[in-house]
Image (spheres, grey):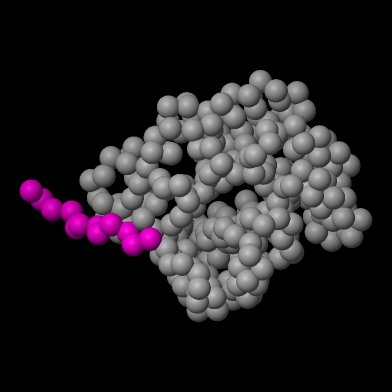
Amino acid sequence: MWNHKAWPGRFLPPSLPAKERLRAYAGWCNAVEGNTTFYATPTRDTVATWAQQTGPEFRFVVKLPRTVTHERRLTGVEGPMRAFLDAMEPLGERAVLWTQLPASFGPPDVDVLGRFLRRLPAGLRRAVEVRHPDFFTDAASTSSLEGALAAADAEWVPFDTTVFFRRPPVTELEQETWTMKPRLPRRTRALTDRPIVRYLGRDSAEETAEGWQPWLEVVAAWLREGRKPTVFVHTPDNVDAPALARRFHEDVRALVPGLAPLPDPEPVEPATLF
């Protein structure tokens, strides 16, 4: 996302129209999760404005519609997928197709996933997030999924919530998140040259930063291997998410000095009465 009610006046100019906020967000971060595409496929013209507001290196990790992943479970989805792919076409190779599957989608469904991934257009990157616990705790299930992903040159997206669930919630949003997010082991194995990590911390910035320490050396090692990872930093309230993402990037740069800095964001002028 690039539009949060707490960000105007902090990370985005306060009076910036909603249709221009992605451009300002792209001054803070060089990738974004397209979570809204899960609920509705945007028009092609809307997606074209996303492409126009961002540079050629900016990455869009766009979630497939829930009709495809949760309602039809990857079968009989030719119509909605055709509409989705047509809408995303203006992003070109900057788009990663993110298949987030429900916790009920387990090892017996791997063949369905494999067939679905292999039918996606060549040249488009694909990534899969699974939530069934057997994929993380049963060696045979892990191997089966990794094989299906490798055959389609797809990445396994870990959603690391281990720090979040380390202690009971404190804030109201932490309590709400506590009932919604999956509790799964941390996974740090990359399958492709473009690994993707989703990390959920706490509403405390310092606790969030302390919790991502294990990821710093993992990401640094990927960079040394020539991979190009994308890491998304979340908190239950996401109030400080852009600043936290930049802080994570700088922590990695301390280990990999050759890593380019993130862009300089445009100045945020304070709101005035006149």
**In this figure, what is the number of numbered marks?**
0
Please state which of residues 21 and 154 is positioned toward the viewer in this rendering. 154
Rendered location of residue 204, percent (x, y): 47, 70
Above or below residue 165? Residue 195 is: above
Residue shown at the point (91%, 56%) measured from the top left: 140
- Quarter of the image holding residue 85? top right
Rendered location of residue 51, percent (x, y): 43, 39
Furthest residue in direction top, as rendered: 79
Above or below residue 111? Residue 252 is: below
Give the magenta part as a residue range: 263-274
Residue shown at the point (89%, 42%) measured from the top left: 108
Judge from the rendering whether residue 31 lies leftward or rightward of residue 69; answer left or right: left
Furthest residue in direction bottom, as rendered: 254
Rendered location of residue 52, percent (x, y): 38, 38
Can residue 35 be seen at all in this image of the molecule?
Answer: no
Please state which of residues 86 and 132 is positioned toward the viewer in this rendering. 86
Please state which of residues 141 and 30 is positioned toward the viewer in this rendering. 30
Residue shown at the point (63%, 40%) measured from the top left: 124
Q: State yes or no: residue 236 in magenta.
A: no
Judge from the rendering whether residue 164 lies leftward or rightward of residue 247; answer left or right: right
Furthest residue in direction left, as rendered: 274
Residue shown at the point (49%, 29%) measured from the top left: 42
Furthest residue in direction right, as rendered: 140
Can residue 86 be seen at all in this image of the molecule?
Answer: yes
Rendered location of residue 125, percent (x, y): 64, 44
Please state which of residues 175 and 45 is positioned toward the viewer in this rendering. 45
What is the magenta segment's predominant secondary structure?
A: loop
